[in-house]
Image (spheres, helix red, strand yellow):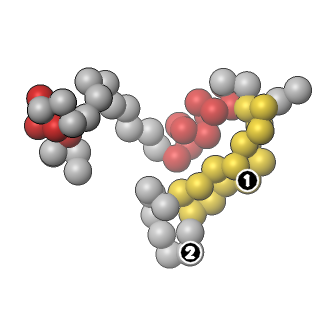
Amino acid sequence: MRVMIPLMQLTGKAPPVIRFFSTEGLEAAITRAGFEVVEAGSFPGGKPPSHYIVARRSS
């Protein structure tokens, strides 16, 4: 998929800026944005992008 993104951007089918995160990096970004990660994990036998994160706004 990463190989196709520049072509998709040229044709207007993908946004001009796309960022890729590791699962740890994504959780850290969510925490920095003021959320508390309640639960996170991967579906059995899966690897990213099957990762899920449940978060709520910190009080």
Q: Residue at horizontal 64%, vertical 50%? A: 53
Residue that numbered label 1 is attached to: 39
To which residue does mark 2 refer?
Answer: 44
The Cα atoms of the two marked residues, 2 and 1, are separated by: 15 Å
Question: Residue flagged by tag 2: what amino acid is it?
Answer: Pro
The residue under the point 77% across, 48% down is 38
Q: Position of residue 28 (x, y in %)?
A: 61, 34
Residue 10: image x %, image y %?
12, 29
Q: Would you say 34 lies left or right of 58 here? A: left
Determine the residue positioned at 18% across, 30% down.
12
Q: Quadrant of the C terminus?
A: top right
Relative to 20, residue 59 above or below = above
The reply to whether callout 2 and callout 1 are in contact (CB within 8 Å) is no
Identified by mark 1, the residue type is Glu
Crowding at dot 1, Cα within 10 Å, few <14 / some 14-19 / many 20+, comes out as: few
Can see residue 6?
A: no
Question: Where does the image place residue 39, in percent across and percent down from the top left?
Answer: 73, 53
**Neighbourhood count class around disc 2 (C-alpha, 10 Å): few under 14, some 14–19, many 20 upward:** few
